[in-house]
Image (spheres, grey):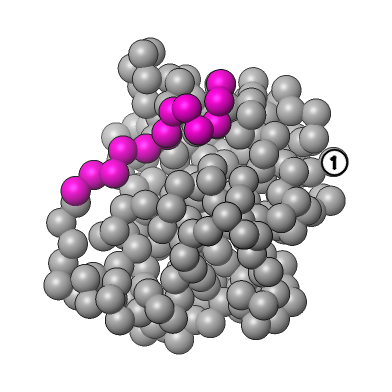
């Protein structure tokens, strides 16, 4: 599959509140990173040398903000395309005075391909990506062999790739795809025990859905 032939998301016209719109206008210049085809200098971007986590599809930013607050020694780069979630996270980041967060509003595949240098990320997280449950839409799922290899090349030696889904068929696809990537080594499936469940995750759990966590390490 060509990584750019099919997108793994649809930009939905969710309602942007007045507060979120103000954040997008006023705070984006401070925390936002424009997409471009030149590679980012991560230490220069954050103003320091520190391990960097890339979270793909951060939603409303609940998880990213929580980690950024408790892990001040780590840099966090969030990628999301939905404006309400970006606006919400911008407000939280500004109110908490977090200086270790930067955001990119663009397609994650293109960000990884064009803006992230090989071997520069300490960690990549993808929590509850769209499962695209209908068979004809499976090609839209983000976790495909080519994508797994792209992520792996951007990780440092020993860097971690963490994922979670509550959709059983997608969990099986993740196992097959990541298990077949020669650059990745399986670690464990205990991720949910080490993070605070988001509102989205709790909603799925309340519906009886089982969360599948995966953690892999760059060989």
Above or below for 78 versus 32: above
Residue displayed at 33% across by 17% down: 134
Q: Is residue 15 visible?
A: yes
Q: Which sits in the foreground, 56 or 150?
A: 150
**Residue corresponding to mark 1:** 219
- Mark 1, other Cα within 10 Å: few <14 / some 14–19 / many ≥20: some
Residue 23: horizontal and vertical position, in percent? 28, 76
Residue displayed at 79% across by 43% down: 218
Q: Is residue 202 magenta?
A: no
Q: Secondary structure at mark 1?
A: loop
Q: Is residue 6 magenta?
A: yes
Q: Residue 119 vs residue 204: left or right?
A: right
Majority secondary structure of the magenta segment?
loop
Point out the image quarter for the N terminus.
top right
Above or below for 129 versus 124: above
Residue displayed at 35% across by 79% down: 27
Q: Residue 52 vs residue 141: left or right?
A: right
Residue 103: horizontal and vertical position, in percent? 47, 65
Question: Across the whole image, how many numbered discs are drawn on residues?
Answer: 1
Residue displayed at 74% across by 58% down: 120
Q: Residue 199 vs residue 45: left or right?
A: left
What range of the chain is rendered magenta?
1-13
């Amino acid at each position: 599959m060509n990584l750019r032939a099919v997108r793994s998301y649809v930009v939905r016209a969710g309602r942007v509140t007045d507060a979120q719109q103000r954040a997008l206008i006023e705070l984006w210049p401070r925390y936002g990173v424009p997409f471009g085809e030149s590679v980012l200098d991560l230490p220069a971007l954050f103003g320091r040398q520190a391990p960097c986590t890339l979270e793909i599809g951060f939603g409303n930013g609940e998880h990213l903000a929580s980690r950024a607050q408790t892990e001040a020694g780590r840099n966090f780069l969030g990628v999301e395309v939905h404006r309400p979630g970006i606006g919400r996270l911008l407000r939280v980041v500004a109110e908490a005075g977090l200086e270790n967060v930067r955001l990119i509003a663009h397609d994650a595949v293109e960000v990884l391909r064009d803006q992230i240098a090989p071997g520069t990320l300490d960690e990549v997280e993808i929590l509850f990506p769209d499962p695209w449950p209908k068979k004809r839409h499976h090609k839209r799922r983000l976790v495909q062999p080519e994508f797994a290899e792209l992520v792996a090349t951007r990780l440092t030696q020993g860097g971690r790739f963490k994922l979670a889904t509550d959709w059983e068929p997608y969990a099986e696809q993740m196992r097959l795809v990541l298990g077949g990537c020669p650059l990745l080594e399986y670690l464990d499936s205990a991720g949910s025990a080490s993070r605070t469940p988001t509102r989205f995750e709790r909603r799925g759990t309340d519906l009886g859905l089982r969360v599948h966590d995966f953690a892999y390490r760059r060989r």
